[in-house]
Amino acid sequence: MTKTPPQRLLTLAQWSNSVGDGAYYTTSALYFTQIAGLTPARVGLGLTIGWAVGSLAGLPLGRLADRRGPRGTAVLLALATGSAVASFTLVRGFVPFVLVACAYAAAQAGLAAARQALLAGLVPAGERTGLLARLQSTLNAGLAVGAGLGGLALHAGTRAAYLAVFAVDAVSFLVCALLLLGLPRAASVPVRPHGGLGVLRDRPYAVVALLNTVLLLRLPLLSLVLPLWITERTGAPAWLVSALFVLNTAAVTVFQVRAVRGVTGLVGATRVLRRAGWVMCAACAVFALSAGTSARVAAGVLVVGAVLQVAAEMGQSAGSWQLSFDLAPADRVGEYQGLFGTGVTVARTLGPLVLTTLLVEWGPPGWLLLAGATLAASYAMGPAARRAAAGREGDAGEPGAPRSAPATRRSEA
């Protein structure tokens, strides 16, 4: 009997996660307020604290994956995430809610870093960005299916329906753990001793990660900012929010794999990031033009802006994936991915406050400021990445290779 290729198992694990997460994201806010009895303000504060903790946990958990082996670490963190989801059903107060939210966010952040390290250990360097594109397409397709399941629970509106959604999400992480357990062990790589600050001592890579965080400020656009912008600043109908979400999800599902073609090496990654920066700049300008227009005009302008935004999103994802792996030492991929992945949690934590102030309150000038910041970060990625690559070559002779130093062997958990 032939073994299932690692790429397929990773894709199935991604599918399992995304279906459960789609259902969870659709229903969790109403469950916490209507069933668990928390106020919206406390839910928002608790989740903010949770994701802040998650952003700090990704780096040490990524380092753990490097030292103990990414497969075993990923399996344990998938089980921990499922347990945290199940624990949400028992929450009846603010303090327990915050504690479970911290555990959930930390496990999610660590799982993302461990899976990236596992992918790096099982998939040849030239195939990683293409596989990440397929995983992103799978993620969006799964989120759409999960959102449909969540919609059924919202329609029912009962405690049992909400609990069923949380059960589905918890089971999805159990399935993910079983799939990851079926993967072969990643090749052992010598782990070099390093100081307590670890990856934070690699300032050029930290700068690249910081610039990527600026680009990731677009994350709350679709879920939070555009709905507020549409209802408060334009005459477009509220249902357009759902249509733009479907447009974005479908576009990523269909075109993300194509968007990574030709994105190889440092030059290709920085080129696509600059191009995506200009596309995002155009998207911001188009969104700004929708302010104060009639329903029909606003709807048309917003659709054009959404098309440009998702095109920029796919380009930014392709370029950042390539850089995150190419600039990381082979023996510390988990730790480096842990730092790079904090950009997502930081953007989701700070993005809502920054973007609602910048765009919804300031209006068109705010869109232009966002465009300028995105373009500046996109162009700064080139010299920052070249400096990081030069430092890696100076230490080891080639980008991504381990430096010459006494080392211990990493054991697979």
Image: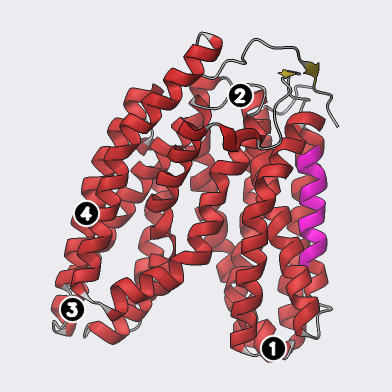
Whether the magenta-drawn stretch holds residue 77 is answered as yes
Separation (CA) of disc 2 from disc 3: 46 Å
**Between discs 2 and 1, the one toward the N terminus:** 1
The magenta segment is 73-85
In the depicted view, which residue is nearer to us: 252 or 77? Answer: 77
Looking at the rendered image, the disc whose residue lies closer to the viewer, 2 or 4, is 4
**Between discs 4 and 1, the one toward the N terminus:** 1
Which residue was labeled with disc 2? 123
Are the residues tagged 2 and 4 within 8 Å (C-beta)?
no
Residue 30 in view (yes/no): yes
- Which secondary structure type mostly characterizes the magenta part of the structure? helix
Which residue was labeled with disc 3? 291
Number of marks in the rendered image: 4
Tag 4: amino acid: Cys
Q: Quadrant of the N terminus?
A: top right
Q: Residues within 10 Å of mark 2 (few under 14, many from 20)?
A: some
Which residue was labeled with disc 1? 38
Looking at the rendered image, the disc whose residue lies closer to the viewer, 2 or 3, is 3
Give the x, y percent position of residue 349. Answer: 53, 65
**Between discs 1 and 3, the one toward the N terminus:** 1
52 is higher (above) or lower (below) than 3: below
The quarter of the picture where residue 107 lies is bottom right
Give the x, y percent position of residue 218. Answer: 38, 59
Which residue was labeled with disc 4? 281
Q: Is residue 89 left or right of residue 101?
A: right
Residue 169 in view (yes/no): no
